[in-house]
Amino acid sequence: MDNLDSEASRMSPEELKQAGEILYGTQWQTELARAIDVDSSRVRQWMAEERPIPISLRSKIILLLMEKSRKSVAYADYLDHQF
């Protein structure tokens, strides 16, 4: 993969914000930092574009979103079958 391809696969701050808010609500930065085992100041640096968002973060975010989706569907099914 050349440098252009790797840059294209890097999440933008807006993409990270969208994913973070879906996962953890408006106060998402601290919770996301905990989930991916980084200091919350690192997330703030990514959002301020002081540091590049790691390319590997995309796959971690995808896994977190998929897990949240699975849990949401499972709980909706549970509630649906209560009555």
Image (spheres, rainbow, N blue to C red):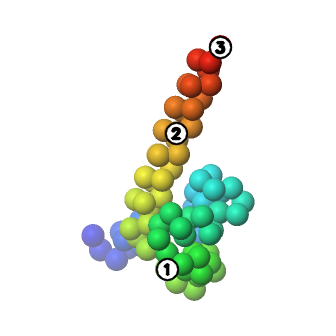
- In percent of width and height, residue 45 lies at 59, 82
**Helix, strand or loop status at disc 2:** helix
**Helix, strand or loop status at disc 1:** loop
- The residue pinned by badge 2 equals 71
Q: Nearer the viewer, mark 3 or mark 1?
A: 3
Name the residue rendered at 58%, 17% in the picture.
81
- The residue pinned by badge 1 equals 52
Tell me the quadrant of the picture where the N terminus can be found.
bottom left
Q: Is disc 3 in contact with disc 1, using a CB cutoff of under 8 Å?
A: no
Report crowding for label 3: few under 14, some 14 to 19, many 20 or more residues within 10 A (C-alpha).
few
**Tally of numbered tags:** 3
| Disc marking residue 12 | none
Label 2, label 3: how far apart the Cα atoms are = 20 Å
Name the residue rendered at 55%, 70% in the picture.
33
Note whether 11 is above or below 49 in the view shown: above
Quarter of image, res 76: top right
Tell me the quadrant of the picture where the C terminus can be found.
top right
Mark 3 vs 1, N-terminal side: 1
- The residue pinned by badge 3 equals 83
Mark 2 vs 1, N-terminal side: 1
Q: Nearer the viewer, residue 7 or 35?
A: 35
Q: Nearer the viewer, residue 53 or 75?
A: 75
Which residue reaches farthest right? 26
- In percent of width and height, residue 32 lies at 56, 64
Report crowding for label 1: few under 14, some 14 to 19, many 20 or more residues within 10 A (C-alpha).
some
- Identified by mark 1, the residue type is Pro
Q: Is disc 2 in contact with disc 1, using a CB cutoff of under 8 Å?
A: no
- Identified by mark 2, the residue type is Lys
**Helix, strand or loop status at disc 3:** loop
Decide if residue 56 is in sight here.
yes
Q: Nearer the viewer, residue 13 or 79?
A: 79
- In this rendering, would 78 be left or right of 70? right
